[in-house]
Amino acid sequence: MLRALNYRKLVLEYMIWVNRQIHHAGGSRMADTRSARENVSFAVVGTGGKGAITAGAILLEAAGKGGWHGLLTRSVGPQIRGGEAAALVRLATKPAFTMARDFNILVALDWKNADRFISAMPVARGGLVIADPASGSAPRAVQEASCTIAEVPIAALAKEIGGGRENMVAVGLVARLVGLEEEAVMEVIAARLGRKGRAAVDSGRACLEAGMEAAEALVPAFPLAPAPERDSPRWLITGNEAMGLGLLRGGIRFAAAYPITPATDLLEYLAPALSRIGGALLQAEDELASINMALGASFGGRPSVTATSGPGLALMMESLGLAAASETPVVVVDVMRVGPSTGIATKSEQSDLNIAVHGFHGDAPHVVLAPLGVADCLFVGQWAVHLAESLQTPVIVLSDQSIGQARVVIDRPADMQFLTRRKAFRATGEPYLRYALTADGVSPMAIPGQPGGQYTADGLTHAQSGAPSSAAKDQSEQMAKRARKIELFDFGDYWGEIEGPEEAETVILTWGSMAGAAREALGGDTRLIALRLISPLPVGQIQPALKGAKRVLLVEQNASGQLYRHIRAHMDLPGEVRQLNREGPDLIGPQEIAATLRDWSPA
Amino acid sequence: MNKPNLKASDFKSDLTPIWCPGCGDFHVLMSITRALAATGRPPEQVAAISGIGCSSRIPAYTNCYGFHGVHGRALPVAAGLKVARPDLTVLALSGDGDGFSIGGNHFLHACRRNIDMTYIVMDNRVYGMTKGQPSPTTEPDWDSALSPGGTGLSPFHPLVIALASGANFVAREFSGDIKGCTATIAEAIRHPGFSFVEILSPCVTFRPDEREWKGKVHKASVPETDDPARAARRIMTDDGMNTGILYRGKRRPYHTSVSDEAGDIAALETRFEI
Ligand SMILES: Cc1ncc(C[n+]2csc(CCOP(=O)(O)OP(=O)(O)O)c2C)c(N)n1
Ligand code: SF4
Ligand SMILES: [Mg+2]
């Protein structure tokens, strides 16, 4: 092991050098060395292709295996390749729903383009910045922060190791600083590099060790408090993956796909998963095609989905109206991003509520759902299929970039069982009425291949048989039938989540992904109502949940207060009402919600 | 599961078409039902998918499963259906506006994708349903209220575009030739991959001049070919009134299989476990 020995010697030399190079900025002393923490956050940044995101992912997975919770979000520049990329990671002893506001540790593989994005990852007071001196000096924002800057020759260390990679050195640095075991991290690295062969794994280990040794001079830095005993199996999963799995559990057998950030990874998850379970994914030429492909497959009896983001949803609207009128079940997942128009493709916003609820032409009753976090994507995906199939209606799911692309350690969600079945047609010898007026509004649906069930699904106003009609009676009866099936449906307890005390004077009312930040902001006497069912608005459930409220704070990530207006169209809110809302990409965090409530103290 | 002794009437519904008397689409409907009877697929195993237009009304006039969707999107509905249900015989039906204008992009990609289905476009070189506007196949000097004096635009050449985009079967017919239409549609259904049949189908109301097509159409004087370059050259240089099967290719159709029973979904969880 001559090579290994040589490199160890090198590290020793560097270590001394590292020590000498430490300097203190902003008057702070040595890196914060307080005792173990419930939360530690770090960022790894570097030019795209250097593997900053992989480094973050490895560390999160190792921590997850060790019993900690955590969350990883990516921040990528607009360039497809070669732009800057950052992994933002928060490790915690309890479930983590939101990314940290600032970071205890910032590792810069280089400072290229840092000025452009460094404001998105501020270093916490007393934080530690590790940078390679070869890449020049730190940007001003970092130099002026009250943090410690340590210079570690990351590139040189990696170069000393055959096949060595800078990001693996960064993994070693952070692992040591937060107190992850070498073997736990190595297990993750080996699993990832295993198929590249033994040499790759060995060089991964060498880099990891080099990083850990280089960090030796900086510890103890930000040790994580011991992980609580695991009481259930854990998953490491993104919101988009969880949504995909939920859809498949719900019975999806066909997906149509046109790529769009941040929904593409959901479609890319579904492609191989569908072929594994005997389903199919069809890549479409555009979203006009993808929604119609999904309708065709659903007409053929296969539960179907497509996923997109705002621009694609806008293109699909006409055909979603067709789905409503022809009563063809379909699920459309909108992983929302900053709009309008192309907006900011890689950043989150909750601004498609209006189009999802009100975007149809004509009166077209349908269902709109929103997952309350990464883990909830699994449930909502499954529930959406159940609702679409049971009600023979389009269901739009409003996920967003902040949960779709967040990778999170979660407790394995409980299994859900729905009796999902389309009301089936059975031949009786009587003429078949596809759009028969039934008490619950749902009519038996024949599937091509069934003798005697032939009908034409139609977006034209139709009689009960499906035959085109322009009679006012048919329009009224079919309109009422389609409204009835949604009005009479029992959505059960799934409409939303209530947390906090039974009765509270202060209530946070929010929807979708914002539930995570609101949950972390909850204090002793505040109640949270987070809506999963957006349309039809569950007025009958929201009203009792607001009992006793004197202050209602509506929290949502869009500029115009879309949920607020939607609620106000259907009901009054008790007491004094305030809104905490703004456009993306600057996410509303728990601290901000808590501060808003604090400042709103009862007179 | 094919049934012998099916008759064209087995494929007709009892709805009365809304078409103007003399509209070419009556003949197309007749040819389609005859062709289906000839292929022996029972009506419940056939799906007729259309967009919007006079011609797109056809599905409800058949006794097959039908989907009368939105304007221009017949092909993607048909593609999704066929991929999800490869056991069905799938027909997509459009007009020239539906298929080449608002749905033009889908036409290119349906040819490329080569899913096993038959696409019949009833080309009357006009938007019939909206009462007489020029379509992509309309002559540049055709006068109309919307484009007085004509569009001045070069007409779209569907057969060449289908060939260039990868369609596996290309034919032209005239609606008045019911025998020819029936035979060609039946061949198109039998041929694997994406089959495209353009049927010249007069709009007697807004293009009364098209009544003269009857005397202008003629059978292709040379046999069909499997060489797309040769077929393209012929189609580019003929008078546009040449009927019959013009190209029959050998491309492998798009393949997927969707099974009735879902595989092991629980096994998908393992990759997330830590
Ligand atoms: C989105 C949309 N735009 C416009 C229309 C109006 N429209 C109905 S049919 C049609 C044109 C039909 O022309 P073609 O496809 O040639 O069918 P034809 O009536 O000639 O058989 C148009 C423009 C519509 N229904 N939907
Ligand atoms: S308007 Fe033209 S295309 Fe439409 S039904 Fe009448 S003749 Fe046929
Ligand atoms: Mg036309």
Image (tube, helix red, strand yellow):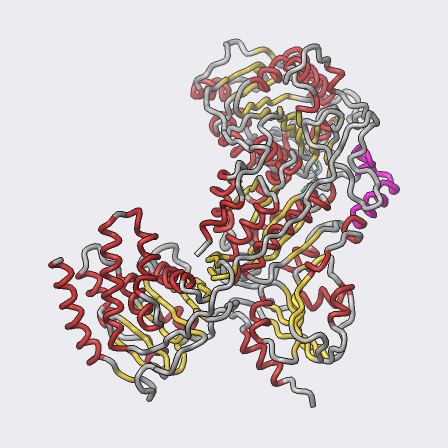
x and y, in percent, of residue B44 in the image: 70, 24
Q: Give the range drawn in magenta.
A: A462-483
**Quarter-of-image position of residue A449:** top right
Above-or-below relation of B62 to B127: above
Q: In percent of the image, x 33 and y 64: which residue is there?
A: A46
Q: In percent of the image, x 55 and y 41: which residue is there?
A: A256
In the displayed structure image, the side of residue A88 where residue B201 appears, left or right: right
In the displayed structure image, the side of residue B10 where residue B252 appears, left or right: left
x and y, in percent, of residue A150 in the image: 27, 77
Quarter of the rendered structure image containing ligand 2: top right
Is residue B100 in sight in this rendering? no
- Considering depth in this image, is A507 or A199 the residue closer to the camera? A199
Indicate yes or no whether the magenta region holds residue A468: yes
Q: In percent of the image, x 62 and y 17: which residue is there?
A: B185
**Quarter-of-image position of residue A446:** top right
Above-or-below relation of B246 to A220: above
In the displayed structure image, the side of residue A273 where residue A448 appears, left or right: right
Q: Residue furthest right?
A: A473
Is residue A146 in sight in this rendering? yes
Q: Quadrant of the C terminus of chain A?
A: bottom right
